[in-house]
Amino acid sequence: MATLLQGLQFYPGDSFIHRLDPRAKLLISTTFLLITLIYVEVTVTTIIVAAEALLAAMGGVVRRWIKTVYGSIPFIAAVFLVNYLVRMLMPGQPPTQVILYESFAAAYRLVALLASFSIFFLTTTPEEIGMTLTKLRIPYTYVFAFISAIRFTPVLAEELQTIMDSQRSRGLELDKGNPLTRLKRYIPILVPLIVNVLRRSYELAEAMEVKCFGASKKRTYLKELKLRPKDLAVIFLTLASIAISIYFKFINPIKIP
């Protein structure tokens, strides 16, 4: 879990992806999401993952992007297992190899979904995310709550790792035993983590109250978002990709291996 949270932390850089308008990057991630949901074929998912890897390389965040995928392995395995068991228990199920293929396709699509938004978070500052959501007419109170959660993510990941290391040094074995035993052994880790979360939330609430949060209805920023020609070009190409995907899926379907 700590690896997954660290993989979603902003990584400073001056790459082409970092300099893109956050609205363009959000549209790219949303496009990957839509195409992954529209097409269930493994071939399309592979193309999406390859495109995401290319963007991660362009942004210089390949290692952290891989961390996101690596940290999500338990969730991916759970999706595969649940999908496989449900299909096996349904009456009139197809051959086993078909069920295995469909279960793998579902888990593979989850990889594409997580990896797409990982690039967005790795190359976009919390301030830019807040400005983007505000531009989308989302109330600032909700935006602030979301941004605060993003800011606390790397802190919680570090605290989680510190608590786990401390408990291991005291003899707590987290990697041995059956799943139920392992789950019980995580209680000494979750309790101090929850206490720290509540303490930080209380401190944040006090700081917001001191600074009169919400006194002004209009939110202003030192830096305003402006779409440049390269942002418009990326947005145009992204919208064209959505249109092409919808056309070949619903209007003029093609067979994809």
Image: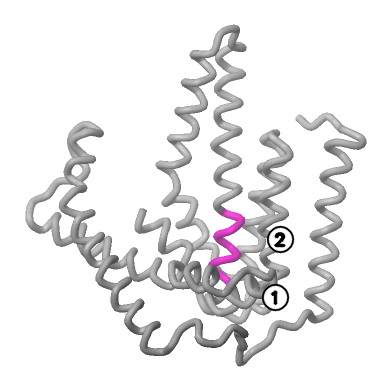
Stretch of the chain drawn in magenta: 115-123
Seen as rendered, the residue at the extreme right is: 252
Q: Please tell me how many numbered marks the rendered image carries.
A: 2
Counting from the top left corner in percent of width and height, residue 19 is at 67, 79
> Is residue 53 found inside the magenta-colored segment of the image?
no
Indicate which disc, 2 or 1, sits on the residue closer to the N terminus: 1
Residue drawn at the location 46% of the way across and 28% of the way down:
82
Residue 176 occupies which quadrant of the picture? Answer: top left
Picture layout, residue 234 above or below residue 45: below
User: Which amino acid type is marked by label 2?
Assistant: Ile
Residue 185 occupies which quadrant of the picture? Answer: top left
Can you identify the residue that label 2 sits on?
28
Counting from the top left corner in percent of width and height, residue 12 is at 52, 78
Picture layout, residue 176 above or below residue 83: below
Q: CA distance from mark 2 to mark 1?
A: 11 Å
Q: Is residue 6 left or right of residue 103?
A: left
Seen as rendered, the residue at the extreme left is: 170
Judging from the image, what secondary structure is the residue with disc 1 in?
loop
Residue drawn at the location 70% of the way across and 76% of the way down:
21
Residue 20: give its label: 1
User: Which amino acid type is marked by label 1?
Assistant: Leu
